[in-house]
Amino acid sequence: MLRLGLGAVAAWGVGAAATGCSDGGSAADGGGDRGRPSGDKGGSPAPGPRRPWRHAIGGWLESSPAVAEGMVYLGSDKKVLALDAATGRQKWAFPLADRAVSSPSVVGGLVYIGSDDKNVYALDAATGEQKWAFRTKSWVHSSPAVVDGVLYVGSWDSGVYALDAATGAKKWVYATDKWVSASPAVAEGVVHIGSNDGKVYALDAATGRRKWAFTTAHDFVASPAVAGGTVYVGARDQRLYALDAATGEKRWAFDSGGWITAKPWVAEGAVYCGSERSLHRLDAVTGRRRWTFTAEGGLGAAATVAGGVVYLGSRDKRLYALDAATGKKKWAYTTGGEIDCAPAVVDGVVYIGSNDGSLYALDAATGKGPAAPSPTGPAPGWSPPGRH
């Protein structure tokens, strides 16, 4: 198995290790998305010593980090990396034939991740050794959700797949009408996922049979979050929808005033929803807006809520920490590039990737961290193959 050498690490300060495990969207569901890895429940930023660092990876980082057992895992341009959470030093790197936009899920000692080389991979979390690979017919931007020994993931070939998490054997596939870049949320034996056909699907987790589908007013649906019997999902029709998880019936819709492309976060009776440049806190039951924070750049990924603080990356190159109750800014840390992935917060450390090609570990309470590299320009645009 090919291994790559140690990457460049910039360390700052003194402190202890960060451990934990990285997920998406809500404290209740296990789904992830490009902006929210499966596994992270948002650890509280506990007081204590810190050791911020920066690991220079290179390329654009759109895969959100996942943290487990003292390691940080993420995808990048043509490789999957494992770094020591305390120091940022590289433990292993697994080569890919194309980039990884998918965010990793770490379950049972395995790292699961999709790639633009059309494969879903299962890697040994300790060594990076490939356990299996399953090939779809197109890109895999969707982040895997692993529940009860089954992996669920979407592909740009329009399919939603259920695979045996131990072997990679296909259990079932459900064909939507367009490509699936969103990630699944699995709850109560049901797989909830959005497609670019403008629908949110509820599929039986055991059989793949469709239970219901909700149609939005646009052809793009972001990754859903499921909490308290409600599916929360946004779309490019500028609305965040709250749907009955059992029937798909609409409970309420919030007009955000901009495209919603990232998964909402649900915690303590509130939904945090990003659209264009603004993050909104809504009442989870009524959809009523509590506060709005507006950044100087677009919001391309999901927020993470931990210990009463909202952590949010922006294309203005900053990572923001906001008071969850009021929306007031506590601190902001400026990286050298746009931020298109979601942060992971574990044991008082926030981990965030930037399109300056670096992964950062910052003090979650103060935002203190290493010096960022020189600013970079915006990420290059791209067009889906045959889909415009």
Image (cartoon, helix red, strand yellow):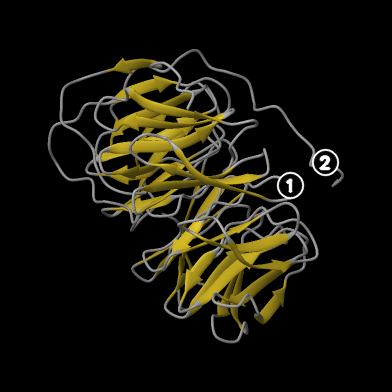
Residue hosting label 2:
385
Q: Is residue 281 visible?
A: no
Is 313 displayed left or right of 96 in the figure? left
Q: Is residue 356 above or below residue 239?
A: above
Kindly check if marks 1 and 2 are in contact, taking CB atoms under 8 A apart as contact: yes
Where in the figure is residue 366, as x and y percent of width and height?
Answer: 25, 34
Residue 124 x, y percent position in the rendering: 39, 42
Which numbered disc covers residue 138?
1
- SS label for mark 2: loop
At a point 35% along the width and 17% down the height, the residue shown is: 9
Q: Residue at x 43, y 63 (%)?
A: 30
The secondary element bearing badge 1 is classed as loop
Given residues 245 and 191, the one toward you in this image is 191
From the viewer's perspective, tell me whether residue 12 is left or right of residue 301. Answer: left
Q: Is residue 165 visible?
A: yes
Q: Mark 1 packing: few (<14 Cα in 10 Å), some, or many (20+)? A: some
Disc nearer the start of the sequence (1/2): 1
Mark 1: amino acid = Ser
To which quarter of the image does residue 170 belong? bottom right
Of 65 and 316, which appears nearest the observer?
65
Task: From this view, report whether residue 351 is shown above or below residue 202.
Answer: above
Disc number lying in front (1 or 2)? 1
Q: Where is residue 138? Give x, y as percent.
A: 74, 47
Q: What amino acid type should be assigned to the residue bearing mark 2?
A: Pro
149 relative to 312, above or below: below
Is 237 placed above or below 330 here?
below
Locate residue 184: give its quadrant.
Answer: bottom right
* Residue 179 circle label: none
Residue shown at 46%/60% (left/top)?
146
Separation (CA) of disc 1 from disc 2: 9 Å
Q: Which residue is rendered at x = 36% and y = 22% of the image?
A: 54
